[in-house]
């Protein structure tokens, strides 16, 4: 047994495990962070940071670094492929509610790199890479994780508490017997990143645009260097077919015709699930982030919600570390599971329904509703507070 049982064990160094680790060590609590890969993921995944997430990251001294490396977006749009702009939402209305009244478009790996540096520079944090958790367990007053190292050797680490932030296929979730309840959306999302300048090709385009269409809806997201195009894709097609450069070109030409072939720098296709674990806690073991909930990316709430889990979990765990009863952790599950189901999942499904509605009357109703919201300052602000995930954080204070 590799021992220093006076530590919290965190399994998985994605954004959620890294935020949990950094927040714990900031409170003087030692952490061993166990990660399967050699280097943290560098591919393009989430790219949206909502204001309260930046408020949290500011406490770790990381928000301003990200703002410097990202694109500040003061507004975002719902559009229609034929009609153009339906409604533009002004995130600037959040002035006074947050230190960061904008959405930041910044690649997820810039956050994980910054957090890794923070942890590497702190004596209480130890990132152990190339080490894959196989299973976890606990006694009355300790936890353990058994791992397999890159060279095939096996060992066990011991600690006082364990956080499973090991992503959608979490072994920690399986080990505690938590069911991942929900469904898989019958669609594949194809995300293409290109140097094409959509801002010059589509009139009045905001940096974040959700574009409805009865035949093919899409999302356009800009980062500092690229535009990302998210397109729903027929799940009956093979990955080879979806990723075939000729088919990718055809799909991009259908969005905006270009005389030059599209310059595609990155492409990824993934199945979308809407799932929430039926329990987040077993004794001294807790789930957070994608290990606990996954949803479609419409609204950019997956990574943000996971980071909000990590902050809430650490706030309570630090008190338990210093003597509060273990049972007080139950509120973490009650609060964050409610947000996952009632806010993140409900909102992401509604965003998808607005985008892919095919019935003409239904589409007009959705469009009129969105236009009515932006025309009324109070409703507009309430909508932006909710979509920026501020409301969910305030409402959970009411949950016992
Ligand atoms: C390919 C891809 C594309 C995505 N694109 C988008 C997008 O466009 N927009 C969006 O909003 N969201 C996107 N997401 C989702 C977003 O990235 C996640 O919501 C976010 O990363 C959640 O963070 P996490 O830390 O909970 O999990 P993850 O980021 O999945 O991190 C889990 C970590 O645990 C490690 N791990 C897993 N198993 C073990 C084990 N047994 N032992 C040790 N370590 C382990 C993994 O290597 C990983 O580093 C995407 C996700 C993926 C995978």
Image (tube, helix red, strand yellow):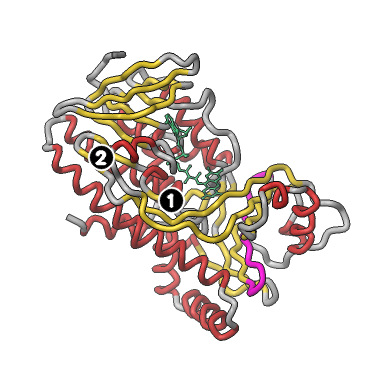
Which residue is identified by label 2? 315
Instruction: Using the rendered image of the protein, determine whether residue 19 is visible from the camera's viewpoint.
Output: no
Q: CA distance from mark 2 to mark 1?
A: 23 Å
Local secondary structure at mark 2: helix
- Whether 207 is drawn above or below 151: the answer is below
Taking the image as shown, residue 335 lies to the left or right of residue 149, namely left
Instruction: Using the rendered image of the protein, determine whether residue 188 is visible from the camera's viewpoint.
Output: yes
Mark 1: give few (<14), some (14-19) or many (20+) Cα within 10 Å.
Answer: many
Taking the image as shown, residue 213 lies to the left or right of residue 51, namely right
Q: Position of residue 368 (x, y in %)?
A: 53, 82
Q: Quadrant of the C terminus?
A: bottom left
Q: How many marks?
A: 2
Task: Please provide the residue range marked out in magenta.
Answer: 213-225
Res. 294 mark: 1
Residue at 59% x, 74% y: name it: 86
Q: Position of residue 398 (x, y in %)?
A: 21, 59
């Amino acid at each position: 047994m590799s021992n220093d049982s006076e530590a919290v064990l965190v399994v998985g160094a994605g954004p959620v495990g890294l935020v949990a680790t950094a927040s714990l060590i900031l409170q003087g609590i030692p952490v061993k962070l166990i990660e399967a890969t050699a280097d943290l993921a560098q591919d393009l995944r989430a790219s949206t940071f909502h204001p309260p997430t930046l408020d949290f990251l500011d406490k770790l001294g990381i928000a301003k670094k990200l703002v410097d490396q990202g694109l500040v977006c003061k507004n975002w749009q719902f559009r229609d492929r034929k009609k153009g702009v339906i409604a533009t939402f002004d995130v600037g209305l959040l002035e006074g509610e947050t230190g960061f009244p904008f959405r930041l478009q910044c690649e997820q790996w810039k956050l994980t790199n910054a957090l890794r540096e923070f942890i590497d520079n702190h004596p209480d944090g130890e990132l152990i890479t190339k080490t894959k958790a196989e299973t976890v367990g606990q006694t009355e007053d300790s936890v353990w994780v058994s791992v397999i190292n890159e060279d095939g050797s096996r060992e066990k680490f011991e600690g006082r508490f364990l956080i499973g932030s090991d992503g959608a296929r979490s072994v920690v979730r399986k080990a505690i017997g938590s069911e991942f309840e929900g469904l898989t959306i019958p669609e594949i999302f194809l995300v293409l990143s290109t140097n094409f300048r959509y801002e010059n090709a589509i009139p009045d385009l905001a940096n974040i645009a959700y574009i409805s269409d009865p035949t093919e809806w899409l999302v356009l997201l800009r980062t500092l260097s690229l535009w990302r195009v998210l397109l729903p894709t027929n799940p009956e097609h093979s990955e080879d077919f979806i990723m075939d450069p000729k088919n990718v070109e055809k799909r991009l030409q259908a969005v905006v015709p270009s005389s030059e072939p599209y310059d595609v720098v990155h492409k990824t296709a993934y199945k979308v699930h809407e799932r929430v674990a039926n329990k987040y806690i077993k004794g001294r073991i807790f789930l957070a982030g994608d290990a606990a909930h996954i949803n479609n990316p419409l609204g950019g709430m997956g990574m943000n919600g996971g980071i909000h889990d990590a902050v809430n979990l650490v706030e309570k765990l630090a008190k338990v570390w210093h003597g509060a009863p273990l049972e007080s952790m139950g509120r973490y599950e009650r609060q964050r599971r409610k947000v996952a189901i009632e806010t993140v999942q409900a909102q992401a499904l509604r965003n998808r329904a607005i985008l892919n509605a095919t019935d003409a009357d239904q589409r007009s109703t959705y469009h009129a509703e969105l236009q009515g919201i932006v025309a009324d300052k109070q409703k507009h602000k309430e909508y932006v507070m909710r979509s920026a995930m501020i409301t969910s954080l305030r409402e959970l204070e009411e949950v016992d």
